[in-house]
Amino acid sequence: MDKSERFVLDTVESYKYLPLLFQAYKPYLLNCERENIIAVGAKDAEGKPCGLILAATSYDENGVINNSWILLSVFVSVKQRRKGIGRSLWEQLRNILQKKGCRELKAQSVLTEAISEVVCGYLVAMGFLVPKRIAKIFSFDDVSIWRSPFVSGSFANAFQPDESFRYLSFDELTEEQIMELENNEGDWYPGLVNPLIGKDKINKRCTVFALDNSNNRIAGWITAIDVNENKRILYRTFFTREEYRDTLVGFFIFTQAIKNHLLAYPHRGGLSSIPTDNEKAMRFSALFFRDAYDHISYEIASSYYF
């Protein structure tokens, strides 16, 4: 018989649940008494934390809580699974969100292939839409990446970049070029690949821009973000302007970034996130990382509508 307890957490109780969360979500839990954050916890029969569900939202321009919330985390300890704890945590969260006028709860997470099946099954059982894989993430460490012939070839200077372009780090951009990126006049790049998102966490050494020497135009980029408490580097956006996609500029942006990575951080691993709907980038990444990754994860997304 399940004798666990479920209750909405306050900031005093929240400290006990920190081990159940990834580092990125711990600040939300520690501020769980704010009206835009909800944390529901479960304790086992011995009074030990065994489950947690966490959601948050933002405020609109008028200071009103957004009616679209984000499910940040769901966790039940291994020994307490299949006892209905995950369902009861969800039911409490759902009831609270309904009272707050929530219209949509979004779920988006990065999961290994094995775990994603379990999480997707849980979400569907709770009434979420069937989750979609929106990105494939190649994970590499300082050993596996050297299996890529493109990496070893780059260090051996086997590939000579097109002299029509030059490759710059974030710090080497001019103020005018940064303004061009910020303004995005004419919507010349999709918002999802905006290289300035997460600007405060950008790894400026490994973020690489290609500039066309003939007109000083930005031809493309790859954005690197410090993640996992600076233990890894995430290559979050990879973009080449349409007029340059028949060139090899994208290849050299990518190889230059990895080369900078291995020179500056020889013992730090990396992650490369590729949207599943970008077939060209997916084919290139599958070729580049062939035999050069230690595991693959997927970013999944779904929604629950009230």
Image: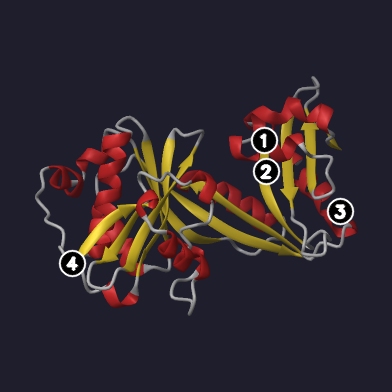
Q: Tell me which amino acid carries mark 3.
A: Asn
Residue topped by disc 2: 74
Q: Label 1 crowding class (10 Å Cα cut-off): few <14, some 14-19, many 20+?
A: some
Q: Tell me which amino acid carries mark 2.
A: Val
Q: Earlier in the sequence, mark 2 or mark 3?
A: 2
Depth check, front residue: 126 or 235: 235
Residue topped by disc 3: 95
Q: Is residue 97 visible?
A: yes
Q: In whole angstroms, how far apart are the C-alphas of marks 2 and 3? A: 16 Å
Residue topped by disc 4: 164
| Residue in the picture at 71% in, 40% down | 28
**In this rendering, the label closer to the viewer, 3 or 1:** 1
Q: In whole angstroms, how far apart are the C-alphas of marks 3 and 1? A: 23 Å
- Counting from the top left corner in percent of width and height, residue 4 is at 81, 30
Residue farthest to the front, as pictured: 175
Query: In the image, is residue 162 above or below residue 82?
Result: below
**In this rendering, the label closer to the viewer, 2 or 1:** 1
Q: Tell me which amino acid carries mark 1.
A: Lys
Q: Earlier in the sequence, mark 4 or mark 3?
A: 3
Q: Earlier in the sequence, mark 4 or mark 1?
A: 1
- Counting from the top left corner in percent of width and height, residue 162 is at 15, 63
Q: Which mark is residue 26?
A: 1
Q: In whole angstroms, how far apart are the C-alphas of marks 4 and 1? A: 46 Å
Q: In whole angstroms, how far apart are the C-alphas of marks 2 and 1? A: 13 Å
- Counting from the top left corner in percent of width and height, residue 212 is at 26, 68
- Counting from the top left corner in percent of width and height, residue 36 is at 80, 50
Q: Are marks 2 and 1 in contact (CB under 8 Å)?
A: no
